[in-house]
Amino acid sequence: MSKWRPVTSGVPQGSVLGPALFNIFVSNMDSRIECTLSKFANDTKLSGVVYMLEGRDGIQKDLDRLERWACVNLMRFNKAKCNALNMGRGSPQYQYRLGMNGWRAALRRRTWGCSLTRSSA
């Protein structure tokens, strides 16, 4: 019988296996999500169009589903990096939450190499 050996966790930085395993692991993250969920490397974005209160509720329900998915899969979102960008003229500010943490709407957001700005004009 083989002897017990210590095993280090994680995948070496720069390996091809790490991102592939991560993509397989998070591939079911978007099941039952009604809004648009975009994933790139370890960055996840949830977006939706809100015309009425039901749209805001739909986005919040998807955030709740994502939080449940993270708990079931023993993962967590970096809530310090979570924010909302409400776009459009006269767009009402709504405070979304992920778990127990809410966050304010951002006036500017840099995402995937683009800078998005909410202007009042």
Image (cartoon, rainbow, N blue to C red):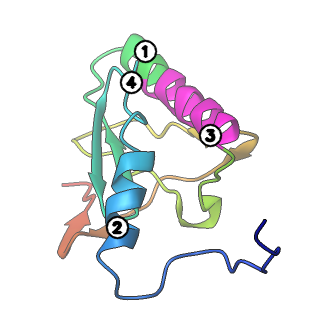
* SS at badge 4: loop
Residue for badge 4: 31
Tag 2–tag 3 contact (CB < 8 Å): no
* SS at badge 3: strand
Q: Residue at x 67, y 34 (%)?
A: 72
Question: What is the x, y in percent for residue 110?
Answer: 29, 72
Residue for badge 2: 19
Mark 2 or 1, closer to the camera: 2
**Residue type indicated by callout 3:** Arg
**Residue type indicated by callout 4:** Ser
What stretch of residues is rendered in magenta? 59-73
- CA gap between label 2 and label 4 equals 20 Å
* SS at badge 1: helix
Judge left or right: residue 39 versus residue 102: left
Question: What is the x, y in percent for residue 38?
Answer: 27, 46
Kindly identify which numbered label has been placed on residue 97.
Answer: 3
